[in-house]
Amino acid sequence: MEGMYTNGWGMKLKGLFVQRVAGLCAATAAGALRRTIDWRAVYFDPTADPVHPLCASWNVYLGWHDHLFMPVVLRGAKQMVALVSEHGDGEILARAMRHLGWSVARGSTTHGARGALRQLLRIDRRHINLTPDGPKGPRREMALGAMFLASRMGRPVVCIGYGYDRPWRARSWDRFAVPRPFTRGRAVFGPPLYVPSGVD
């Protein structure tokens, strides 16, 4: 029994070590790739971008899960918080995002949803970034949690479309996109949209 108990802790510590190393490696690789790409954005209202000096509101940013790479590598130092699922891959992503300057709330629509919602509702002076079709899809079909959150918090929603030039695509449910080195990445920021209060 003692051997089994010790082995269980050993496996857990090994798993945590692997997650930490994987998160650091992912953040380092993403940072290196970021510096090779020509990034540009177009706006309906440039002050909706958190990097703009006249961005005066705390926004809820929405973008599809398959293009998560771009906001993660470009907006980490801009008082951003993201919702990341609690499964093993989510732990690696959360660690990588923290290395890149993000704050992270853990949970999803399928696991830990109430706890994650409580975390997000307590957020004050930070922007919130959500992938409304994550963490498991269906791909590019919007769940309504983001609208509920924006309604309760009285925050504007800013929808953002991302695109890359001939990206690599994973064989995952979202066909996750990774831009190729020395290519182009583009973002289109929609106007701030206010959701009526009291949405259920």
Image (cartoon, helix red, strand yellow):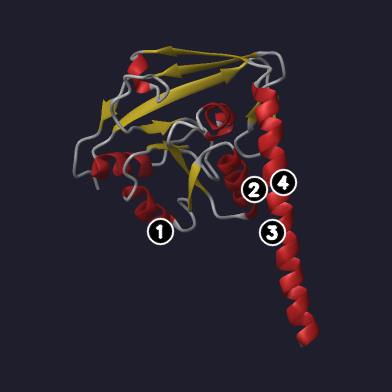
Q: Residues within 10 Å of mark 3 (few under 14, many from 20)?
A: some
Q: CA distance from mark 2 to mark 1?
A: 20 Å
Residue drawn at x 32%, y 50% as measured from the top left: 122
CA gap, disc 1 and disc 4: 26 Å
Q: Are marks 2 and 4 in contact (CB under 8 Å)?
A: yes
Which amino acid, mark 1?
A: Gly
Residue 7 in the image: x percent, y percent?
Answer: 78, 75
The answer to whether residue 139 is left or right of residue 6 is left
Mark 4 element type: helix
In the displayed structure, 190 sits above or below 127; it is above
- From this viewpoint, which residue is outermost toward the right? 3
Query: Looking at the picture, which amino acid does disc 3 mark?
Result: Leu
How crowded pointer 2 is (Cα within 10 Å; few <14, some 14-19, many 20+) is rated as many
Nearer-the-camera pick, 169 or 139: 169
Q: Tell me the distance, in whole angstroms, between the alpha carbons under discs 3 and 4.
A: 10 Å
Which is more foreground, mark 1 or mark 4? 4
